[in-house]
Amino acid sequence: MKQKKDMHELMAKKLSGEIDKQELVFLNNWLNTDIKNKELYHKFEEIWERSSDFGNDFNPDVSKAIARYKKRIEKTILLKKKRTRIIRLTQLAAAAVILLFFVYLTNTYIKTNDLITVVSDSTATKQIILPDSSIIYLNINTEIKYNKSFKKRIVELEGEAFFEVRKLNGARFTIITKSTSVTVLGTSFNIKAPTDEINTQVSVLTGKVEFVPKGINKKLIIKPDQQATFNKPLSKTELSVIKNHNFLVWKTGVLSFKDNSLKEVLATLTENYKIEFNVRDEEVFDLRLTCVFNDQTIEEILEEMEIILPIKINILGKKAIIESN
C-alpha cells in the first residue's frame, strides 16, 4: 500500500512538472516493469487532463462523491436500465474517486476561507515562498498557518522551521508558537517549537530578533550567533552563544565537528538522527573528532567514525553499540 501511494505521488509530480531527475528515473523504471503500471499511468494522465479546470482551492469530499455515485447506480437499477448503463456509472464513480484522490495528493496547500495551512510529513522537508517573498524551510512534521492576503505578515508555527525574512518598508514579521512570539524586520533564524511546548528555541544567524515568551512581560533581543531557549514549565528563558551550528543539519545536510569529544558528537547524532547509543566502554567518550559530513546517512557517518577513531560500532536498527577497538 505504501509503494502504491508513493507511485501515485510520483505520477502526480510528473504530470505537474515538479518531479526531479532521480524521481523520474525511478518512475520510468517502475512503468517499464509491468504493462499494467503503464496502463495505470495513462488512466491517471487522462484524469489529470480532465481535472485541469479545478482550482487550487478545490477541497474534495471523497465520501460524498462515492455516496452520490452509489445513489445514481441504485436509482438506475430500480429503473431497470440496461446493464451497460450500470457499468458505465460504476466506471464514472471509480473515475471520480481517483480524480478526487489525485487532486488531494497534488494539493500542497489546505485552504480554509482565507487561512492557508502548509504541512510537512515525516519523510521530507519543505520550502515555502510567502506572498512577501520571504522563504520558510519546514523541517519534517511541521505545520505553518498564515492568512492568504498576508498583509499583517503573521505566521503560526508548530514544529521546526528556518526563516529568511525579507525586509519590506519597515513592516514587522511575526511568528507565533503556542508559548512564544518572535518579531523581526528582516533576518534569518531558526525556530524549534515542539508540540510538547516544553522548550521553544530561537537561533539567529543574521539580523536581530525580538523574542517574547507568553505570560512574561519582558522582551528579549537576540543577535547574530545567539540562541534563546524558553522553558515553559519553569517560565525561564536562557540566552547563549551558538557554538555548534549542527542544529541546522536538517536544512543544510552538513554536520561539522572540530575537536569535539565523542560524547558531544553522539549527543548531536542522537538529536538529529533519533538514534540511541549504547556505549560499552566509557573511556571512548573522551576521544576527539574533527570531521565534516555532507548529506550522508547515519550509517555512512558511523562507518567513517569507525575508520577515524579507535572504536567499533554495531548498528541494530535505530540503536548502535559502541566499544573501544
Image: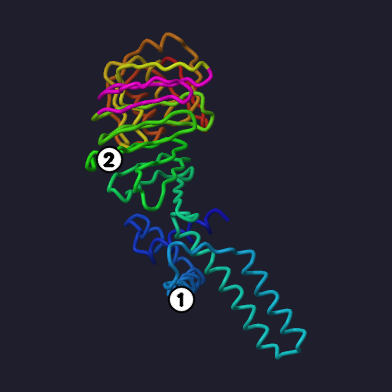
Image position of 31 with respect to 251: above or below: below
Any part of residue 295 in sight? no
Q: Position of residue 90 (x, y in %)?
A: 64, 78
Residue 84 shown left or right of residue 279 in the figure: right
Q: Which quadrant of the view contains residue 307?
A: top left
Find out whether residue 184 is within the magenta segment. no
- Quadrant containing the C terminus is top left
Q: Can see residue 224?
A: yes
Image color mode? rainbow
Rendering quarter of residue 302: top left
Categorize mark 1 by other alpha carbons within 10 Å: few (<14), some (14-19), many (20+).
Answer: few
**Rendered image: mark on residue 210:** none
Mark 2 or mark 1: name the one nearer the start of the chain: 1
Marks 2,1: beta carbons within 8 A? no
Nearer to the camera, 11 or 285: 11
Q: Quadrant of the N terminus?
A: bottom right
From the image, tell me which residue sits under label 1.
50
Q: Is residue 206 above or below residue 267?
A: below
Q: Residue at x 36, y 48 (%)?
A: 150
Q: What amino acid type is highlighted by mark number 2?
A: Ala
Residue type at the position of mark 1: Arg
User: Who's the residue at 31% across and 32% down the image?
Assistant: 189
Is 185 or 57 nearer to us in this picture?
185
Label 2, on which residue?
Answer: 171
Q: Position of residue 55 (x, y in %)?
A: 43, 66
In this picture, which residue range is highlighted in magenta? 208-233
Residue 167 shown left or right of residue 230 in the figure: left
Q: Where residue 283 sits in the image (x, y, percent)?
A: 42, 8
Q: Secondary structure at mark 2?
A: loop
Residue at disc 1, secondary structure: helix
